[in-house]
Image (cartoon, rainbow, N blue to C red):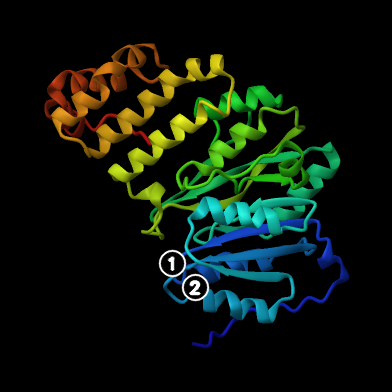
Amino acid sequence: MAYKIQCIFIVCSSTMNNPKISIIVPVYKAEAFLHRSIDSILAQSFTDFEVLLIDDGSPDESGAICDAYAQMDSRIRVIHQANQGVSAVRQRGIELAKGEFVIHIDSDDWVTPDMLESLYEKAMESNADMIICDFYCNYSDREEYIKQQPTHLNHKAVLEDLLYNRLHGACWNKLVRLSLYGRYGVRFPKHLNYCEDYLTWAQLFQYPIIIAYHPKAYYHYDQCSNDNSLTRKYTISTFEAQMDFYHRLSVCIDNKLYKVVLCDIITRWAFEAFVHNIFSASEYRSRFFRNIPDFLRSLQPYKVVIYLLFASLGMKDMAHKCFLRKNSISYI
């Protein structure tokens, strides 16, 4: 099927052999919103970039859309592969990227025209290895500004902010020097498609990289368009992926720090499972009863801990009905 691209950009530049920025776009079942994402990239005021559109075996027309864009703009490279999951896509993008810096943009999101220019200028000004910026969450009825200022810019402090959920673990609000991945042997984890970005940062923040913060939002994180997103469709599989991440995290960070943040992570995810009501009362008790000491030591709000205590003691149904009736917690 042929696709008509409304905005045509044709770029023939020798700098494309060594662009300043590589943009990695994982593509899977994205035909409904892929145009919006790619068009926002091609509208950038900063033009010295390449785009890696990685079609992860998408069964819809996403691959054809990617190919149509590549014919119109020489900065775009399309990679078609059998489905391997988003973590494998991100890693392949890193291996193929030619830029000085790299950033990821998801196919269901979009960015403002000044994003690359602003982040690259900040990187040059601060001589930073990573630039973290704010972002927008876009819902069907509103737009929310999400501030992402780290407590401190030291790599250890940023890691703790990430682990304590004070910073979002996404790849798309972070411009990163590509050479760091090779220098420190950092890779996106195999066979993990939930929090794969989070785990990658946990690896990278073990090293003394230079981090800068840019207090402006450029990225629009779409919370309503993509029904295929694992982060928006919570099931038992989501919980199992979270537990997989939790076990992998133990080998990425210092054991002392891991034990400290363990309580908070377990409590956060136990409550997420509670909110989505994916386990029966008996399942909830068998899975979480042993975590009661962790709940009590966690930094989560006391109401969260109370709900988890009742649920873990075998009164999950009563606790969940109470939660729904009060509707007093905005979480996740």
Q: What residue appears at the point 70 percent right and 39 percent down from the top-left corner? A: 185
Check the image and report above or below for 312 versus 37: above
Mark on residue 29?
1
Closer-to-camera residue (45/123): 123
Instruction: Judge whether residue 268 can be spotted in this image.
Output: yes
Q: Quadrant of residue 99?
A: bottom right
| Image quarter hosting the C terminus | top left
Element at label 2: helix
Element at label 1: loop
The amino acid sitting under disc 2 is: Ser
Closer-to-camera residue (232/148): 232
Q: What residue appears at the point 61 percent right and 66 percent down from the top-left corner? A: 53
- Dot 2 alpha-carbon crowd within 10 angstroms: few under 14, some 14 to 19, many 20 or more: many
- Labels 2 and 1 touching (C-beta < 8 A): yes
Q: Quadrant of residue 154?
A: top right
Q: What residue appears at the point 29 percent right and 35 percent down from the top-left corner? A: 273
Label 2 sits on residue: 62
Sequence-wise first label, 2 or 1: 1
| Disc 2 to disc 1, C-alpha distance | 6 Å
Q: For this view, does 288 lie left or right of residue 40? A: left
Q: For this view, does 298 lie left or right of residue 212? A: left
Instruction: Judge whether residue 169 can be spotted in this image.
Output: no
Mark on residue 237?
none
- Dot 1 alpha-carbon crowd within 10 angstroms: few under 14, some 14 to 19, many 20 or more: many
Where is residue 69? Give x, y as percent.
62, 77
Where is residue 149? Give x, y as percent.
63, 32
The amino acid sitting under disc 1 is: Lys
Q: How many marks?
A: 2
In the rendered image, the residue lying farthest to the right is 14
In the rendered image, the residue lying farthest to the bottom is 2
Q: For this view, does 123 lie left or right of residue 224? A: right
Q: What residue appears at the point 14 percent right and 22 percent down from the top-left corner? A: 314
